[in-house]
Amino acid sequence: MAQKKSDPNYKVIAENRRARYDYFIDDDLECGIILEGSEVKSARTGGTNIAESYAAVEDGELWLVNSYIAPYDKAKTFKHLERRRRKLLVSRKQMSNLWNATQRKGMTLVPLVMYFNHKGLVKIKIGIAKGKQNHDKRATEAKRDWSRQKSRVMKDHG
């Protein structure tokens, strides 16, 4: 996610750091999300969490389930529910690919990051993932530790 530093509108709202630890991410795709006004204002203040959420294809539509957007205190009449299901926007071709991946290949859809893009719109990056087992997680940790040690040695001697 290398973005331009000079872009004033790009801002990460929420990130699911544990996703890459718990899953093998095969592919990712950018989706739009339907939000209410108070949800967007709350997201701008930073009260969002997608760590426990997932995406699901139901009745030909893509939904983000169990994501948390804090209530916006200044909204008086049009308040939102914190953990409601939110519809994600993708093309029909992408929807069929996601459905095939989840139904046939045993994959799952994990939200990776929610952000404001360069136009100021809320986007969410969904990863098509397969769950890791404990031995896979240990191997990933060992590889990461080895790369850290290697960089320290190269820094000291190089």
Image (cartoon, rainbow, N blue to C red):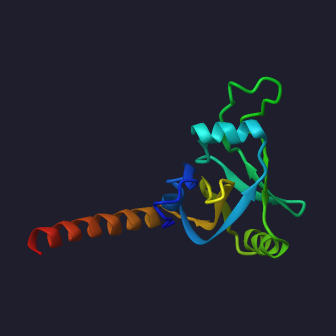
Q: Residue 141 placed where, x, y %?
A: 37, 62
Q: Residue 137 placed where, x, y %?
A: 44, 62
Q: Residue at x 70, y 42 (%)?
A: 40
Q: Residue 110 placed where, x, y %?
A: 64, 59
Whether residue 126 is visible:
yes
Compare residues 43 and 16 and report the one nearer the observer. Answer: 43
Q: Relative to 37, is 61 above or below? A: below
Q: Residue at x 46, y 60 (%)?
A: 5
Question: Is residue 27 left or right of 92 when viewed as pictured?
Answer: left
Q: Which residue is drawn at 34% across and 65% down?
A: 144
Q: Residue 128 placed where, x, y %?
A: 65, 68
Residue 66 figure quarter = top right
Question: Is residue 104 left or right of 131 when viewed as pictured?
Answer: right
Whether residue 47 is visible:
no
Q: Relative to 46, is 30 above or below? A: below
Q: Which residue lies furthest to the right in this view?
A: 59
